[in-house]
Image (cartoon, rainbow, N blue to C red):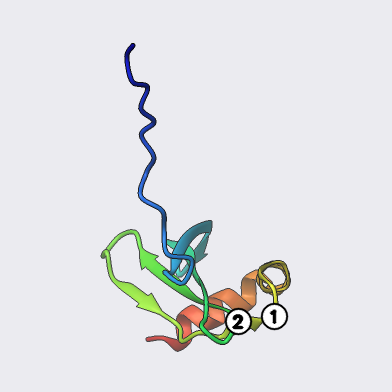
């Protein structure tokens, strides 16, 4: 009788940050790629930061963990409520 084996990918630590790609923004005629770095902190809160990548120069910029919520759904809601001009202002402030 042949043994059946199941290959499982290694389980991910739920406390490890996960990067989620967001819609790119335009700033000063350039396309800036945007992602959210999300993690579940030891204190039970969900925290996240924004990462910007200038597609022309490859320069990367990150905010501090400016998002914090009791649930992942609440955190995503606060990200969705950001308007484009707020995201561009955050990007400009990291210069």
The image shows residue 59 at horizontal and vertical percentages of 28, 70
Q: Which residue is mark 2?
A: 44
Disc 2, SS: loop
Quarter of the figure with the N terminus: top left
The image shows residue 70 at horizontal and vertical percentages of 69, 80
Q: Nearer the viewer, residue 62 or 17?
A: 17
Disc 1, SS: loop
Tag 2: Cα neighbours inside 10 Å, few (<14), some, or many (≥20)?
Answer: few
State which tag comes first along the sequence, 2 or 1.
2
Q: Residue at x 45, y 62 (%)?
A: 19
> Could you tell whether 90 is left or right of 71 in the image?
left
Give the image quarter of residue 82: bottom right
The answer to whether the residue labelled 2 contacts the one labelled 1, judged by CB atoms less than 8 Å apart, is yes
Residue at the top extreme?
Answer: 1
Q: Is residue 75 above or below residue 64?
A: above
The image shows residue 11 at horizontal and vertical percentages of 41, 53
Residue 53 in sight in this render? yes
Q: Residue at x 63, y 75 (%)?
A: 85
Q: CA distance from mark 2 to mark 1?
A: 7 Å
Q: Nearer the viewer, residue 8 or 57?
A: 8
Q: Is residue 3 above or below residue 49?
A: above
The image shows residue 45 at horizontal and vertical percentages of 61, 82
Quarter of the figure with the C terminus: bottom left
Q: Which residue is mark 1?
A: 70
């Amino acid at each position: 009788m042949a043994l059946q084996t199941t290959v499982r990918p290694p389980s991910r630590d739920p406390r490890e940050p996960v990067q989620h790609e967001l819609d790119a923004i335009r700033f000063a005629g350039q396309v800036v790629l945007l992602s959210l770095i999300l993690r579940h902190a030891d204190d039970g809160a969900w925290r996240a930061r924004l990462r910007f990548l200038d597609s022309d120069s490859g320069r990367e910029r990150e905010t501090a963990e400016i998002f914090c919520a009791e649930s992942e759904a609440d955190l995503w809601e606060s990200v969705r409520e950001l308007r484009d001009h707020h995201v561009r202002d955050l990007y400009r402030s990291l210069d």
